Image: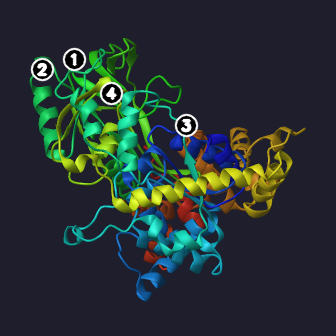
Amino acid sequence: MQQTEAFHLLKMGKNIFLTGEAGSGKTYLLNKYIQYLKENYVKVAVTASTGIAATHLQGNTLHSWSGIGVRDTLTDDDLDKIISSERIKRNYKKARVLIVDEISMLHNYQLDMVDTIARLLLQQHLPFGGMQVILCGDFFQLPPISSKDSFTQEKQFAFEANSWITGDFYVCYLHEQHRQQNDPLYNILNDIRSGTAGEHTKVPLRTRYKKEPQGHTKATKLYSRNVNVDLINAEELANINSEEKIFKMTSDGFPLMVEGLKRNCLANEELKLKIGAEVMFIKNHVLGKYANGTRCTVIGFDPHQGWPIVKTYDNVTLIAEPEKWQYEDDGIIRATITQIPLRLAWAITIHKSQGMTLDTAEIDLGDAFEPGMGYVALSRVRRLDGLKLMNLNEMALTVHSKILDHDKIFKQCSADNVEYLKTLSNTEIAQYQKQTLIDRFGGCTIKPATRKEKALPTHLITLEMLKENQSIIEIAENRDLSIGTLLTHIEKLKGLELVNDHHIKHLKCMLKQEDFDTIIEALKVSEDGKLMPIYEQYNGKYSYESIRIVRLFVMQKDIS
């Protein structure tokens, strides 16, 4: 299936399993659909099965968003607690679309638990309560992580969940290749995916045994286990005889949310660099100046700001300026960390390399311990001549037998869906998509407007009125909106750094100074800034609206 065909099905509101080999454009298409939803004011929950994957999409882990946490089962008490949580209820009731990235690492029972909770909170008779659910990933990549006690037990993949069957997922198996293309490495990866990897597969791999990669990019070493990586990077940096510079991460938000971002982000809290250090970018630049995995060398430090100056192996010189990683909730940025988007790149774990594209890599698969690990590592590289293979065990070229069998089913389902689209005219598809957008999702198409106010998203209209020094009371009266709605606008604008102290200072006057001081002290020690604990702490003395007003000032340096 081509990306344009998959995009049609996404916009038609179908539950989708978006899959394809590494480099087929899954993440690109996912981001394109997320942008489409946001442009049409459709609430979308962006989640992933792992924290690292979630930060790439500015989302949250499915475990946190859905309320399932680290549970293996849901008891009646668990369900009562989850569906009583205001945060969890709000998550489900606002979302029209739920996206789950890196589905290969989600257990079947975890997907079923999300379905159970969604039905209880939304519509009992509909799969996932009626939300459109998009599962994205490739089951040939890393499988679900088992606990130590259950490591030897049989893997249960998400496609084995009851909710996968009842959810009627349309498979979109992308076949376009944007990474290996016609390189011999493509045939090796296909052998692994088809379960036919054998001696004939090892022949081209042996040509890369301990052989330096072609080209001018120094190879990143990929290892199965983290201990090798930390040791190599520390030793290599210590061996450079030049002054060390330290870049410290900064953060904004409530501690619990910030810690979650730090834990799941590839950025270091303290990044230690020297001239000559081998580094890689760990984020895609918004204008395409670098990508997640771009290798370079530190050649100096900017004399004005002090930021690292790096030269890529394509001989491009860049200043690596700080970037932000954010946790976004319903369009409101709740936590932010800022750091130089680099990490030492002499070595990295295979697990953390997932999602990267590397020009060259030195890969040690001598201690590969999971089916699919070899496929993940080898598929990071663009070309076979960019590979230096150190070791290879039998596990490295294997994939789980269940995945091999089910992949044939996925491909046939995808082919059937292409034929289904052919039965529809372009007019029918467009009508179907428009009906889904407006009637089901409650979105709206953006039309030309004669008045400036109508042409702007609602929170930006609020921004314009704040800039005209209108108070929140005046704005509420002029726009016939509630104070609560306008506070949501201001939270969103504050997260986007579009409002400052001057714009909202009048909000402090809505509370007595002593009440403002009491609430702000309580919020300062709050882990996550939730309203209910503070409301209950003072037995309802302060309204939720008052607490929300004060919360706007917690992360500002000047709160006097």
Question: Which residue is at 27% across, 46% downward?
Answer: 397
For disc 1, the marked residue is 275
Q: Can residue 48 be seen in this view?
A: no
The reply to whether the C-beta atoms of the residues labelled 4 and 1 are less than 8 Å apart is no
Question: Which residue is at 43% across, 30% downward?
Answer: 180
For disc 2, the marked residue is 240
Snapshot quadrant of residue 198 = top left
Foreground residue among 101 and 338: 101
Q: Could you give the CA–CA distance between mark 3 and mark 2, rounded to whole angstroms?
A: 43 Å
Snapshot quadrant of residue 533 = bottom left
For disc 3, the marked residue is 176
Q: Which amino acid does label 2 sit on?
A: Ile
Say which label, 4 or 2, has the lower sequence index.
2
Foreground residue among 189 and 58: 189
Find residue 412 and report its horizontal and vertical position in percent.
Answer: 57, 55
For disc 4, the marked residue is 384
Secondary structure of the residue carrying tag 1 is loop
Above or below residue 348? Residue 252 is below
Disc on res. 370: none
Q: What residue type is labelled 3?
A: Glu
Secondary structure of the residue carrying tag 3 is loop
Say which label, 2 or 1, has the lower sequence index.
2
- Alpha-carbon neighbours of circle 3 within 10 Å: few (<14), some, or many (≥20)? some
Say which label, 4 or 1, has the lower sequence index.
1
Q: Could you give the CA–CA distance between mark 4 and mark 2, rounded to whole angstroms?
A: 30 Å
The reply to whether the C-beta atoms of the residues labelled 2 and 1 are less than 8 Å apart is yes
Foreground residue among 520 and 180: 180
